[in-house]
Image (cartoon, rainbow, N blue to C red):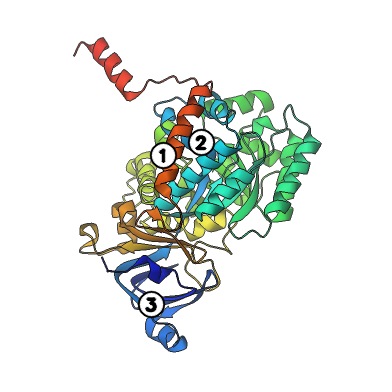
Amino acid sequence: MTDLAPYLLQADQLLLAPGQLMLPDGPVAGHAVVIADGVFRDVGPADALAARYPHLKAIELPGMLLMPGFIDAHHHLTQTFGKALAFGEPSEIFRRIWVPMEGVLDEEMVYLSSKAAALESLRGGFTTVVDAGTRAEGDASAVARATAEAGLRCVLGFICNDLGRDAAAVMKQAHAHLARWHGHALVHPSLAVSIPEVATDGMLRDVSALSAEAGVVFQTHVNEHLVAVERSLVDRGLRPIEHLHHIGALGPQMLLAHATLITPAELAMLRSTDAAVAYNPVASAWKGNAVAPAVLMDAMGIRFGLGTDGTRSDAFRLLDAAEAAQRYAFGLSIGDSSCGGGWTWLDHACGAGAAAIGLGAVTGQIAPGLAADCLLIDIETPEFAPSWDLTWELVRFGNRDQIVAVMVGGQLRLWEGWPVDWDGRALMREVTAAAQRTVARAPIRRVHPTSGRHRAATTARSGV
């Protein structure tokens, strides 16, 4: 690793000359970027940029890759206190874990949970996350404050479920949410419905139309679990995606989380309406009933990004899971040994992911005019020597510990895994205490035991 010091990346204007630069079409050597006013001001051959900006001294970064920050297309920032409580649990854990836990969060707990999640995301290489909205009381200002302080770009959902609520009041709050965060540097408003079954058809249509008018994404969870699909069939005679299409709610403003149990007809509906999907492969492995056919979606031109669903905020492991899930679920049976060729997953975790969440004109690529949301990666490691295919190597060999620096909006946020302008370790101590108090108060009901209890029960049953 170079002897680069973090203060060198904290100037108002920077001319960075990395060993490799990840551009939309792949990595290139001998190129540089100029960062000014929070954006990539210029990108091109290093010699040309040095000539155009003689007042800037180039910061040489041999052995380093400068690449776009990753996009987490689906997260639940206020579920951080209970992440491991969901291990081994059967489907629809929101009913037994997340709703009870979020229901006891006050504003301070929402803030602490969200800031801890933001720090974990930045450490994992994410510079943008999409928050699906919190069920905690109050508005989303505590989430916004936490992510902005941490320096994480956030698409901030506001939940518009109206069953048992005053629909007019919900819509008034939705308008206020959009107005409050319009034009914010790091917070981008979004509207959400938890699952289509908890909103009336009128609300689904109205929120979709308002999102389209405001140019924001409308988030909802669809076709994730068998029980949800069957519930929709019983209650409405249609599967969730079919229902959204039937009432005219699908459109390019839609961001559908999961879409794992999806029929050919529903895929056609997504393509015809240009609705986008958050593909969450780790969620499928940990608690899902199926894997979204992401390779097929890509071939059909269906837009999608990669999401963690709050499972673990490690972008490189997400890339690996995205590829592996496609190979296990689809590739093995048809002899597809490539399953996207590596580049597919990097694209959908960066530029294509940004487009799927409505921020394609803001972030996701290293290109002039886009926000300088980027990572500095040490590629002089045993995993990358020798290097034959850097893009695919990032998908299969990349590690979080190779992330030297994280920048969002042109500002250095993390250096070697920790914040440069606030005490991340002190936050962890505070979060640990707060989480213990919160979980003790919440009426959480787990079905699966912890690993220690599972070991004891298994040993007792087997006699081994």
Measured from the top left, where is residue 216 in percent x and y? 66, 53
Q: CA distance from mark 3 to mark 1?
A: 42 Å
Q: Secondary structure at mark 2?
A: helix
Q: Residues within 10 Å of mark 3 (few under 14, many from 20)?
A: many
Q: Quadrant of residue 448?
A: top left
Measured from the top left, where is residue 404 in percent x and y? 34, 60
Q: Residue at x 44, y 69 (%)?
A: 10
Marking on residue 417: none
Marking on residue 31: 3
Residue located beneath label 1 in the image: 429
Q: Nearer the viewer, mark 2 or mark 3?
A: 2
Is residue 248 in view from this perspective?
no
> Is residue 198 shown left or right of residue 226?
right
> Is residue 341 shown left or right of residue 219?
left
Name the outermost residue toward the left.
464
> Is residue 385 shown left or right of residue 295?
left
Residue located beneath label 2 in the image: 79
C-beta proximity under 8 Å, tags 3 and 1: no
Q: CA distance from mark 2 to mark 3?
A: 41 Å
> Is residue 198 shown left or right of residue 80?
right
Q: Secondary structure at mark 1?
A: helix
Q: Residue at x 36, y 47 (%)?
A: 317
Q: Residue at x 59, y 49 (%)?
A: 145
- Specify the amino acid type for callout 2: Gln
In the rendered image of this protein, does residue 25 appear above or below residue 263? below
Measured from the top left, where is residue 46 in percent x and y? 38, 81
Q: Earlier in the sequence, mark 3 or mark 1?
A: 3
Q: Earlier in the sequence, mark 2 or mark 1?
A: 2
- Specify the amino acid type for callout 3: His
